[in-house]
Image (cartoon, grey):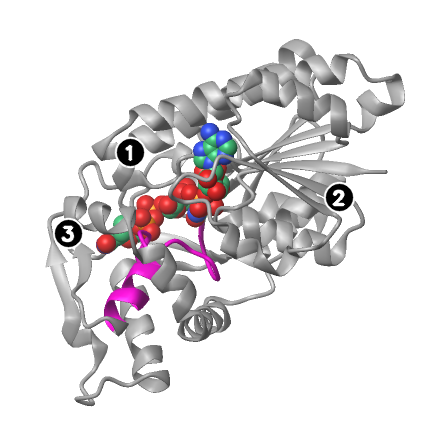
Amino acid sequence: MNKILVTGGAGFIGSNFVLDWLSLEKDDVINLDKLTYAGNLENLASLNGNPLHHFVRGDIGDAELLKTLFSEHQPRAIVNFAAESHVDRSIHGPAEFIQTNIVGTFTLLEAARAYWNGLDDEGKKNFRFLHVSTDEVYGSLAVTDPAFTESKQYEPNSPYSASKAASDHLVRAYHHTYGLPVLTTNCSNNYGPYHFPEKLIPLVIHNALSGKPLPIYGDGQQIRDWLYVKDHASAIRCVLEAGRVGETYNIGGWNEKPNLDVVHTLCSILDELSPRADAKSYKEQITYVTDRPGHDRRYAIDASKIHRELGWKPLETFETGIRKTVQWYLEHQDWVKNVTSGSYQNWVEKQY
Ligand code: NAD
Ligand code: DAU
């Protein structure tokens, strides 16, 4: 039986990936997740009782656990989502980012290498280690600069992006030095269902509906390139299936938007779908706050390589994806309530 090992599969992108995978593919999923504040088994509730989903609570930095999982399940591939992912948290406390994103990825690579070395020739040839990374490793662009291609020099600016850059380099080295069949994807900003409300889009939806300020860092003219999360999941499936071993693939939605425009769009959709009691616009709640230290001005992904080589392109435009996202949040207020209780409140007090 074919199985894949997914790490971080209870987080935002990982859970969307696992849900889509199990509705489309035949392989079992071994889902290894530490369940940090960002991991949430409620994202996977629809898989309860599904014999193809095997959830294991654990750390990618636990070498003994990894050895047991590899020998028990003999996966044909690993998809590594597990990471600390929030830039602002990496500024307040970088240690966990170094531990999981760098040391954790290293430990996973070591375990994968030992397992891969023990496979027969066919198993070795077919095995894949797919590392999920970010466009933030490339640094910041000026407005007129061309979008990031895969050959853009790495210039990470935050502890988060530096830790992801380090992990990308380790993955690359394990291919060049040991021959491990790796693939790396560098994706732009995702949005969609199950997005933790510490990140801009779900935070704005949540705060708007709760009558709270919508915090805009600095002048709100920083540009991000947005991709609907299910399009990211389909791109990863595509790279896993047909990507050239040792290559990196940029994934993006061709949707560059200044933050303020994104917030205005969210307010307009909410004004239409869930108007304020006083009939005023949610835009009234916009508040300018102190900028993020070292805030990258612009990210833009050139996703032409994955389109040219593998035929992948996103299905959603920003307009269709953002409307679906707002609708999802309006229909899943219980999910939001559950994740915004507890430790999330401490974070909000510290950050804002
Ligand atoms: P997330 O923070 O929502 O989820 C991360 C998941 O990893 C959580 O379930 C958490 O419990 C788990 N985890 C953390 N440390 C772990 C450890 N030591 N061992 C096992 N599990 C652990 O993150 P996300 O937004 O879903 O991002 C997933 C991956 O995609 C990350 O590697 C991130 O760098 C990358 N990425 C994210 C975006 C984005 O816009 N969110 C864009 C490009 C790339
Ligand atoms: O580019 C990919 C990256 O996108 C991923 O690698 C990260 O894991 C993911 O968190 C995301 O990083 P960003 O820092 O771009 O996402 P965030 O949602 O935190 O912020 C988006 C933009 O909005 C950014 O310019 C900062 C700004 N912002 C964010 C928050 C939380 C605000 O203006 N106000 C806020 O309250």
Q: Residue at x 88, y 23 (%)?
A: 122
Residue denoted by label 2? 28
The CA distance from mark 1 to mark 3 is 19 Å
Picture coordinates of residue 88 (x, y %)? 26, 41
Decide: few, some or many residues near mark 2? Use Cα within 10 Å; few <14, some 14-19, many ≥20: many
Camera sees residue 144: no
Marked residue nearer the N-terminal end (2 or 1): 2
From the viewer's perspective, is residue 247 above or below residue 37? above
* Mark 1, residue position: 90
Examine the image and state in which quarter residue 326 appears: bottom left
Residue 74, percent from left and from top: 77, 27
Counting residues from the start of the chain, the first of labels 3 and 2 encountered is 2
Q: Nearer the viewer, residue 15 or 65?
A: 65
Q: Closer to the camera: disc 1 or disc 3?
A: 1
Mark 3 CB lies closer than 8 A to ligand 2: yes
Q: Nearer the viewer, mark 2 or mark 1?
A: 2
Query: Residue at position x 31%, y 39% from top?
Result: 87
**Which of the numbered marks, if any, corresponds to residue 218?**
3
